[in-house]
Amino acid sequence: MAIREVRELGDEILTKRSKEVKEMTPRVKELIDDMIDTMYEANGVGLAAVQVGVLKRIVVMDVTGEDLIVMINPKIVETSGEQTGQEGCLSVPGKAGQVTRPNYAKVVYLDRDMKPAELEGTELLARCICHECDHLDGKMYVDLVEGDLVDVHYDEEYEEEVEE
Amino acid sequence: MTKGELKINTRAIVLDILLAVEKEDRMTGLLIHDVLEQYAFLPARDRAFIKNLAEGTVERQITLDYIIDRYSKVKSGKMKSLIRCVLRMSVYQLYFMSQVPASAVCNEAVRLVRKRHFNNLTGFVNGVLRKIASEKTDLEKIDNLSVRFSMPEWIVKRFIDEAGEEKALEMLKSSVGTRPVFIRTNRTRISPEELKVLLEDEGVRCEPVEGIDYAFRISGFERLYDLKSFRDGYFSVQDISSMSVAELLEIKEGMKILDICAAPGGKSCHAAEILNGSGSVEARDISERKLEKIEENISRLALKNVELKVSDATCADENTFDSFDRVIADLPCSGLGVIGRKNDLKYRVKEEDIASLAELQRKILRNAVKYLKDGGIIVFSTCTITKEEGSEQAEFIEKELGLKKLEERIFYQSQEGSDGFYAASFIK
């Protein structure tokens, strides 16, 4: 359990292609756990391994706060429709921009036990699937933004745990 | 990825509303309305949360204070305003917003208190809330009706005195939670059947109302103004009890009608719709500002036979004596029949106001009957349930003013039905 440093826009690594995960190892397990902690801590809804500096095709997502999804070697096999809306990225803190994405996406991947799985998402989940899979190919949402990036103000304090 | 949304703490907004209610003595409904205008850019879900939490906390104040006082050594009345408001809104979430997890309620409360620089009280707030969250009281089992329904004692007593225990309980139940919304078809523009189709196309649930073929009960919409059928003037929102005023008037085409205290104009517009372009309605009220509200309704409904006039109903206007076929006297009152729609009214109205309101009504009624031609009909109405502002005034109109009563309708508010209302018609 650890919070890792999130790489920010300008860091060369974010433009690189991540490599397939061939087998589950204790190190990969630890990486996934750390990615989950890092994503939640930063109030994100999705995070790719490259954002914590590891070029492996791993994505963690949770768009509702209750549905954690871990995807290894994800591959989008189908998309349809269109949605335009604000999105942001943990690697571009304090900013957001308008991006058009498919409104539906179907993705196949390996789960934490390296078993094949598939997932269909619409709206925010579809947006997140596309956004994270782009990261694995070295693409950032800022190149897709229509208009300007805007500032968003996050709560200055993060949640402080209250003693039970 | 992040959601890329502007992050706004909805609970902090609610807290500011509650603090303003305590300090400024402004009507809660207006205050919430103004705040929501400011935050029009927020998603509908956040806006609904703000509205429900702020309104609910005010509405259930007596109940919430009772719960807080059971678990806190410092009684709610003695607390700092900020702490009291945070506790009230948090207990409201614990009891009445089941979708919010208890841990979130406690954590958010502590954050709010810390942010407002009451660091030394975070432990207290946390302790009280966690105790309250862990031992919920069954509110249904509270015998004291004032506490259970968050209603001042004197109003509970009034309800029982006026309507008996069984009806009073129903009236109390209808005073908390959401009220049904009734609408009146603007029959000068559309038939009720066509309106129903339009509304259903807009995703609105539309149920018929027994006894009034042009009225519907609607639900399943967020804001009235989002409905094109409303903006286009095909209907007005009006309680079924209040529709009885124009019904009792026995209006015939071509008549001259006077509404002496007209704002916001619901009854004037209803009368004008029945006239269907013929005759005229003169809608009077005390100030330009009050008339603006009527003006809005007239133009939305596209009514051409309504004239507006600033006039103080307590002063006699001799020029218009004996000149109207019908007079509407819907007069200022204690409003005990519409408590369920105005969540802080119950704390504002005082028992001693009733006598002076009744006196004011008599003063206006003395003038009102003079505007009526011989053989004309006047309807007196109030949105309350007290005898002094209802049947006793009817007696006054008969005995002192010499008119003959035709019909009387008394409504007691109920959960699925109308508001509390009194209306009676008299012939000169």
Image: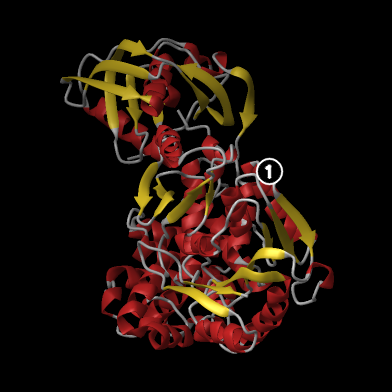
Element assignment for label 1: helix
Q: In this image, B109 relative to B168: left or right?
A: right
Residue B117 in sight here: no
Residue B317 pos. (x, y %): 81, 71
Query: How is the protein colored in the picture?
Result: secondary structure
Q: Is residue B426 above or below residue B164?
A: above
Residue at coordinates 64% horizontally, 82% vertically from top-left?
Answer: B357
At which x and y percent is residue B111? 50, 59
Q: Which quadrant would the N terminus of chain A be assigned to in this image?
A: top left
Q: B4 or B314: which is nearer to us?
A: B314
Instruction: Name the quadrant containing residue B221.
Output: top left
Q: Residue A29, located in which quarter of the rendered image?
A: top left
Q: How many marks?
A: 1
**In this orientation, does residue B44 appear?**
yes
Q: Which picture quadrant has residue B411? A: bottom left
- Report whether B213 appears left or right of A112: right
Residue visible at 59% across and 65% down in the picture: B28
Of B91 and B318, which appears nearest the observer? B318
Q: Quadrant of the C terminus of chain A?
A: bottom left
Q: Tag 1: Cα neighbours inside 10 Å, few (<14), some, or many (≥20)? A: few
Viewed as shown, does residue B133 lie left or right of A41? Answer: left
* Residue B179 drawn above or below residue B144: above
Residue at label 1?
Answer: B299
Taking the view exactly as shown, the residue that stands out farthest to the right is B319
For the point 44% across and 35% down, the residue is B194
Q: Nearer the viewer, residue B194 or B5?
A: B194
Amino acid type of disc 1?
Ser
